[in-house]
Amino acid sequence: MSKKLRPDIDEYFLKIAKVVGERATCVRRKIGAVAVRDKYILSTGYNGAPAGIPDCLELGCLRDQQNIKSGSPHDICRSVHAEQNVIIQAAVHGNSIKGATIYCTTAPCAQCARMLVNAGIKRYVCFIDYPNKEARYLFKTAGIKFEVHEEPSFSEELIGEQVLAIPDEVFIRAGKFSGFRSYNKEFYDKLLQNIRYVARDDAEHDENWKQLIPYITIRSGNDWLVMQRLPRSGEKRLHHAYTFGVGGHINPSDSTSDVEGEDVIERGMNRELNEEIWIDDLKNIKPVGFIYDDSQEVSRHHLGIVYAAETGSKEIKALEPEKLKPFFVNIKDLPKYIDGRENWAEIVYKGYISKVK
């Protein structure tokens, strides 16, 4: 299952309910609830003592003080339940919750279920189930959908990486090719007009997307930059393979940068350079072509925009030396580093580097 670009609508409102619950004054359980209709929040509620009345944070839990077990009848309790407060707040502000969905951190008790049935809700979504058969029965009889989802997380790691891509149909209309194609501004502009961010996990396997990769070649006189991928560089199949360019995916951070005169792909290209290598006196950076290779499963999901750069220095170092080993090689010796594992290296050599005078 791939990661998502953003939370779906149920996860979104469950997260809001979770935040609402942080306002609860109950010391046993913090519960939050949100009434939503047509993606619009009608009211919110959390469990706690009535407004203006001393609560359990001040006085301690009345049920604990009387040794009442969890799940026992709620007549001895200071709190108004979260779902009850949703109904009350809606009434106070003149909002009907008829036909609404209730998003709550936990399933309802029987009393709240009765009230919600009378309020006319259509759906109840939570992430903690509550073992109350009567509430389930009431919802089922009243035709109210009841759903228990996974608890939402606020961790950004659960949201997948977004990468810049174009639909394959756009690539076809612009002029799909295989191998190396010399730079053409009209072709490039057609690509740029249809770029968008998609989930990388999806784009890596979906034939309908082509991820855009800036790929920068660097020369110093007759010597060209070669980088060896080390075992900690990622994909096992590329360990110890050689590449003739610095490249990588373009992410949303490249869209937020505002460098005058640069488009998002150029910004991504410069970021990749700054993240992967340190090299002095880099100049004359310009686009020179495109790479597309449909002969391998991985490569056919990527479209490279090839840039050429020059430097008067051969002093270079990898910023992640455990992943990459950079060095310069004379142009006549470059074929020795074409090993069949890094197809883009061979394509850029034959299509561009070998023709540079």
Image (tube, rainbow, N blue to C red):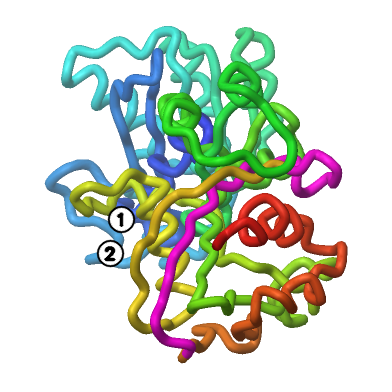
For the point 22% across and 54% down, which residue is it?
259
Pointer 1 residue: 25
Q: Quadrant of the N terminus?
A: top right
| 238 sits to left or right of 196 | right
- For the residue marked with disc 1, what is the amino acid? Thr
Tell me, yes or no, if residue 40 can be seen here: yes
| 327 sits to left or right of 53 | right
For the point 17% across and 42% down, which residue is it?
51
- The Cα atoms of the two marked residues, 2 and 1, are separated by 6 Å
Judge by depth and name the residue closer to the eye, 176 or 312: 312
Tell me, yes or no, if residue 159 can be seen here: no
**Res 218 label:** none
Tell me if residue 295 is in the magenta stretch.
Answer: yes
In percent of width and height, residue 34 lies at 38, 31
Judge by depth and name the residue closer to the eye, 47 or 191: 191
In percent of width and height, residue 46 lies at 34, 42
Tell me if residue 345 is in the magenta stretch.
Answer: no
- For the residue marked with disc 2, what is the amino acid? Leu
**Res 57 label:** 2
Q: Which residues are magenta?
A: 293-314
Is 245 above or below relative to 322?
above
| 178 sits to left or right of 290 | right
In percent of width and height, residue 280 lies at 36, 83
Residue projecting furthest to the front: 357
| 355 sits to left or right of 76 | right
- Helix, strand or loop under label 2: helix
For the point 75% across and 41% down, which residue is it?
300
Label 2 vs 1, first from the N-terminus: 1
